[in-house]
Amino acid sequence: MRKEEKDELIASLVETLTENKNFYVVDSSALTVNQVNELRRACNKEGITIQVVKNSLIEKAIERVG
């Protein structure tokens, strides 16, 4: 991913973080593919957005939000 793409993603994350009062950081590495698919379906049904982001990028976005 190029630096420009990372900057755009961070800006998008900053916007998302400021628009929403709650967000969750989840480690789904222990889940099976079927479990992840079930989680995505359940979230989609409830109107919850799931976004996979590298730790370093979300950290930079949180720093910018303050």
Image (spheres, helix red, strand yellow):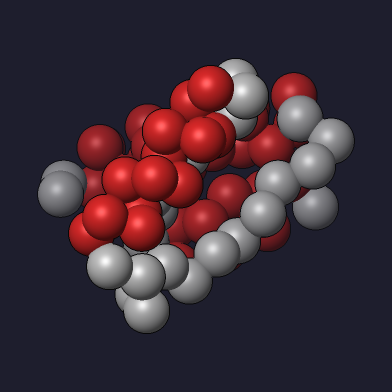
Front residue of 30 and 35? 35
Residue 53: image location, x then y, percent: 39, 53
Q: Is residue 23 left or right of residue 43?
A: right
Q: What residue is rendered at 39% in x and 45% in y?
A: 38
Residue 22: image location, x then y, percent: 79, 42
Q: Is residue 30 above or below residue 46?
A: below
Q: Quadrant of residue 47?
A: top right
Front residue of 59 and 39? 39
Q: Is residue 20 above or below residue 56?
A: above
Q: Which residue sits furthest bottom?
A: 30
Q: Which residue sits furthest right?
A: 21
Residue 2: image location, x then y, percent: 16, 46
Front residue of 26 and 35? 35
Q: What residue is rendered at 69% in x and 37% in y?
A: 17
Q: In this view, does 8 lie to the left or right of 22?
A: left
Q: What residue is rendered at 62% in x and 24% in y?
A: 46
Q: In this view, does 58 lie above or below 4?
A: below
